[in-house]
Image: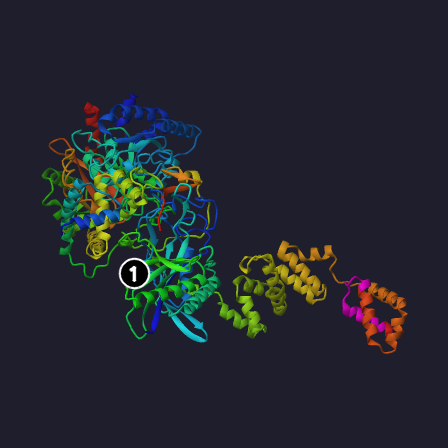
Amino acid sequence: MTIDNKLIEYLEELSRLRLTEEEKEKAKADLSSIINYVDKLNELDTENTEAMSHPFDYTNNFRKDEAGSSFDRELILMNAPQKKNGCFRVPKTVE
Amino acid sequence: MNLMEIFGMTALEIGKMIKERKISSPEVTRAYIEQIEKKDPQLNSFVSVCVDEAVKKAEEVQSRLDSGEELSALAGVPAAIKDNICTKDINTTCSSKMLESFKPPYNACVMERLEAAGAVILGKTNMDEFAMGGSTETSYFGPTKNPFDRERVPGGSSGGSAAAVAAGLAPYALGSDTGGSIRQPCSFCGVSGIKPTYGGVSRYGLVAFASSLDQIGPIGKDIKDCAEVLSVISGHDGRDSTSVRNAEYDFSDSFNEGIKGLKIGIPTNYYGEGLDPEVREAVLAAAETLKTLGAELYEFEMPIIEYAVPAYYIVACAEAGSNLSRYDGIKYGYRSDKGESLYDVFCNSRSEGFGMEVKRRIMLGSFVLSSGYYDAYYKKGLQTRRLIKDSFNSAFEKCDMILSPVAPTTAFRLGENVSDPLKMYLGDIYTVSVNLAGIPAVSVPCGFDGKGLPIGMQLIGQTFSEAKLVKAAFNYQMNTDHHKRAYEIMKGGVL
Amino acid sequence: MAWETVIGLEVHVELATKSKIFCSCTTEFGGEPNTHVCPVCSGLPGVLPTLNESVVEFAVKTGLATNCEITRFNKFDRKNYFYPDLPKAYQVSQLYLPICRNGHVDIEVNGTKKSIGIHEIHMEEDAGKLVHDPWEDSTLVDYNRCGVPLLEIVSEPDFRNADEVIAYLEKLRETLIYLGVSDCKMQEGSMRADVNLSVRPVGQTEFGTRTEMKNINSFKAISRAIVYEAKRQIEQIEMGKKVLQETRRWDENKDATYAMRSKENAQDYRYFPEPDLLPIEISEEWIERAKAEMPETAAQKRERYVKELGLTEYDARVLTAERALALLFESASDICKEPKEVCNLITGELMRLISESGTSADRIDIDPEKMARIITLTVKGRINRNAEKEVFEALFRENIEPEQYIKEKGLMMLEDDDLVNDTVDRVLSENPKSVEDFKNGKEKAFGFLVGQTMRALKGKANPQTVNKILREKLGSM
């Protein structure tokens, strides 16, 4: 398949990225060739194959419900580009 | 002794000298820092060097040793850490503009373990941005050069770690391996490395690329150093749900036993089209060496491997796209000052903060998961993953381990593949299947090509069979000297 | 034309665990912004989640209590979207294999019984809080609530009116509170409901286009929002317009719903299995254990209180209206073996004290053991009814030690028969007129003499003892 403008713009939006026109052309070409290559998987019959999301079959790794101490707020905020009143600051969110 | 000699020593040798008071940890540390300052401008293997912290730490470890405290065999020995492993209060950049000034407020699990073992951290090593790449060329801080030929790449994504060890700028290093990122740079730089079984080393504090594939592992001058480092950093960690290994690795037999009767599988289709003839020759010669040491060779076919690269890029990019969504300019990292709205902050911060390869993979990840394409791509990728795991399982019913090349070629020229992502991805053909299956592999030098560039071989084993892989690699290294050549060449004044 | 309203609910409840779902930060409500936060719940690079076992246990119990099938092999998935209240830019939730499916909750509205289907229940993490900063026209982000465990309980579209919805929510709330899995406080947001509503002509089988109303925070508001929105949709259709599929916000003050500006043209959450968490396997044994540990429901308690303890239906209802009251009733009764006395003290004094002090029944903190001791003293006649009330009030307000308080305040009944004897003698000698009247058959005079004696003893004698001694003495005079 080829990646057209509509699809690349949709992927930009989902990914919260904005490409320049030049980057967009390159991305279209690169993604198209990668996806065409990936389509090679259609040669495989996976009709009865279960999807494998984890590389092993372990299950049930739990933590006991015990409250511990939280982090110093200064440390949580120390890398924040903008902060105010102990909070991260962002442009206003609109409803 | 001549202080210069320590640059050719293994970590264990240096550790022993420190223990025996033949040299002190601060002396070793200062020597390495000077060496980095002198030589690294030509390589760019370090993103940051912790001059003051390292010396302070070395003095502290030394005084613990002097007071009679029992510390590990690596106590006082300096190390280099890939810059995607969180180090408290020390910048952890992932070689990205996005995290250029990010200081983690916590230490990764492996850092705590190294600290407890008395390790001294020299600095953080260069890498492909967010570990996405096989050449260290996607780093925001510029590429690392291969110490054997500075016109060439060191491999990647742990290119800084491998180059630093090869060039004698660090006795050992930590890397991370999502699709070959430890093994392939080891191969390109003539050093040894281990990609541990998934779940063997805690990922807590490793900045995630692809969560179901990532593992931290050691890079060293020889396999014995790697095994020692792995012993220190591995083991169960309650903070990583996928840290499932409760038992400690036990390498005690790996260095005492021979390999008589060890069955080594040779997947013949790995050695076909696309493989550089010099690499093929070197790896098959290694097979013969192992045979003369008592191993039995077993030839078989593993056709599924052809599908490993596409399956890998689907799974890795899907997870990466999600993992890298948190870099949105709000909590940490780069924030663009362009635009007014929240949407602008998200898009501009990410567009300006990430390099092109990272963006490409994020978009590919969005694609394979997006509605309408999930089944055809993501699910298909996970099903292929199952087939690959099944193939390895049946192979390991017939042999103890598999011998293969690490990469189809030796180190390529800087810029040679950078504009063709698909060509770059195809270079991962021998390594990615190991990550998809979650199994361990070691990468050790097995020769040099006509241009004098190192060639690596890979031994792949069943889940948690690291001790067996190390045993085979150790026996091989005891009977060959490819792994010692790197330092010989460096000493000859290449740098 | 006659219209039918079709409603489905998505109810989110915060689980009453001590720690968050994926880290050990406290789930406590309130606190300064970003003080119940760690690298894990604030989504720092490199961190990983670890699953709180109690969340799974609570989900299983909730599933059993709502007649669901428990998904033996279930998994978490990531729901990907960008918003500042979501620090990882994905919410860990369950899409493909939710922990509970295909259940039902039975309700009764005006004497008619109905079964409401439960489509699924899944576990997920809560998001943070956004506060608008009017000074700078920006938004401030607080992650304290990030990672608080939630269950999302998704009903089938089985409701036809607001009364059914409220009956269901009340039943669900009571069930969850009695299970101990959530405190279901709507005002603190620990229970929230999203209402999906559509209308169709009566008799039509296909559904109409639905709208979704999010996070309405009281039963009353839900009820009013449903009535409003159904009317609005019917009017739209009758005017020849189409109902748009959209999310609408209920404006409490204006008593109307408004379309929210759509965040994006399409929501494509790109769900996929969460690689950082292992799948969950729930064994038969686990389910059996959960069943064995299932606490009595409110309905079961009411039945038992009436049948076994002899309480009235009314009292049983008052006691079970709040789990805290029922638990206090049971613990105190177990100790003093006087369920009716305990019941009277709760339904009378305690309810009065709660309403006077402006607190609510779920916040009371009364030591049932001390309460039982007060009742035992009363029943044995060691203190009188007025003293009982006084001591209990002191217990309610200040958690006093009952015996010490009774002693300090001198509320104990006298046990000293000699003192009573002496006092009676004195009263008799001081009131010859009354003695005379009594002897002449005036029973009223006896009452006067008892009163005089009790007054002289400051009310601390047992009236029966005074009666007995007085009659003996009068008889022998």
Foreground residue, B252 or B106?
A: B106
Residue C353: x and y in percent read 61, 60
Residue B159: x %, y % from top left: 23, 35
**Secondary structure mostly taken by the magenta-highlighted segment of the chain:** helix
Query: Residue at left 15%, top 44%?
Result: A30
Toward which corner of the image does residue B23 lie, by quadrant?
top left
C398 above or below B68? below
Q: Secondary structure at mark 1?
A: loop
Q: Position of residue B404 (x, y in %)?
A: 17, 44
Residue C65 in the image: above or below residue B468: below
* In the image, residue C475 above or below residue B64: below
Q: Residue furthest top?
A: B2
For the view shown, which residue lies furthest in the front direction? Answer: C239
Residue B448 seen anywhere in this rendered image of the structure: yes
How many numbered dots are placed on residues in this image? 1
Residue holding disc 1: C245
Counting other residues with Cα less than 10 Å from the Cα at mark 1, is it few (<14), some (14-19), or many (20 or more)?
Answer: few
Relative side of B239 to B266, left or right: right
In which chain is the residue bearing label 1? C
Q: Is C215 part of what is drawn in magenta?
A: no
Say left or right for C383 vs B127: right
Q: Position of residue C418 (x, y in %)?
A: 83, 64
* B399 over C180 or under it: above or below: above
Residue drawn 44% across the image and 61% down it: C221
Quick check: can you spot residue B246? no
Taking the spot 31% from the left edge, 60% from the top edge, the residue there is: C97
Which contiguous range is marked in magenta?
C455-472
Q: Amino acid at mark 1?
A: Gln
